[in-house]
Image (cartoon, rainbow, N blue to C red):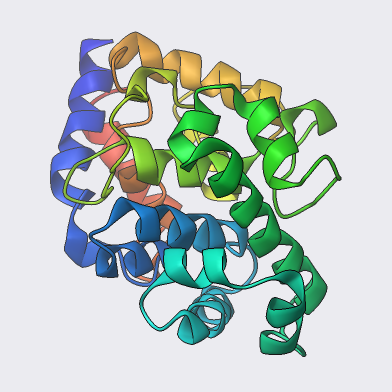
Amino acid sequence: MRELKDLLESLYKKLNKRGLVDPDPLKFLYDYPDIKDREITGLVASSLAYGRVAQILKSVDKILLPMEGKPFDFVTSHNEKDLTAIYRGFVHRFTTDADIVRLLCGIKHVLKEYGDFENLYLCGVEKFTDEVNMSKKSYLIPSPCDGSACKRLNLFFRWMVRSDEVDPGGWTKAKPANLVVPLDTHAFKAAKILGFTEKKAPNYKTALEITSHFAEISPLDPIKYDFALTRFGIRDDMTFDDFRREVKKFSV
């Protein structure tokens, strides 16, 4: 366990750097010091975080551009008809303009009913997805009840709850100890190399299993190492062969 913690701490110190964020869509959040704007930006950016990175950045930019630097004011002052006209023709892989309008309407609904997203988060993940989706199913904001690993949603929670050089945070009542690893293919592969799971599918149960192993090492902040570990495979200059070499250095 000591060797494993030393490995993870070494990677955290080396890789958990603002300079390594690009091309992660997380970079959009740094432009918004006001948490009201940041959480809307974060939910949009995380929801579109699938597919090629270049396309993700382009698509998020297209959504944010009409907001003119004020996402909160924009969302709360536009109705469904307005949004339909503004985003007509938008496409990001499987996501259409109708999906984006539905998401932004869901965001407006949450702000009206709860004041902010942290208050809703404290009600639980299932309630969170139900309210944002306005009781309809959505692949942009899937529920753990549907078997999804909820990678993009857990990514959003990480951005909002944790606060360090990479994660901007902003929520004050939610605790990092309750976060679940955003389980994408990169996090899943890293976890398998570390021996944290033998499961074949990255679903929500697998995410909870992997999180529990990280919690043994860092109980107050179990997904502290997520950003550092997922640089392997995401960045062109960092491969999983590099990660395996790091693991061997610590005899893990």
Identify the image quadrant of the N terminus.
Answer: top left
Position of residue 41 measured from the top left corner of the image (x, y, whole percent): 45, 63
What residue do we see at 28% from left, 47% from top? 167
Query: Can you say whether 195 is above or below 64 in the image?
Result: above
Counting every numbered tag in the picture gives 0
Position of residue 124 measured from the top left corner of the image (x, y, whole percent): 59, 22
* Viewer-proximal residue among 157 and 136: 136
Q: Can residue 184 be seen in this view?
A: no
Position of residue 98 measured from the top left corner of the image (x, y, whole percent): 81, 72
What residue do we see at 18% from left, 55% from top? 17
Picture quadrant of residue 101 = bottom right
Picture quadrant of residue 4 = top left
Query: Can you say whether 14 is above or below 47 in the image?
Result: above
Q: Can residue 243 be seen in this view?
A: yes
Identify the image quadrant of the C terminus.
Answer: top left
* Viewer-proximal residue among 111 and 17: 111
Position of residue 241 measured from the top left corner of the image (x, y, whole percent): 41, 52
Relative horizontal placement of residue 249, taking residue 200 as reference (left or right): left
What residue do we see at 80% from left, 26% from top? 145
Query: Can you say whether 20 is above or below 14 in the image?
Result: below
What residue do we see at 72% from left, 32% from top? 203
Relative horizontal placement of residue 139, taking residue 41 as reference (left or right): right
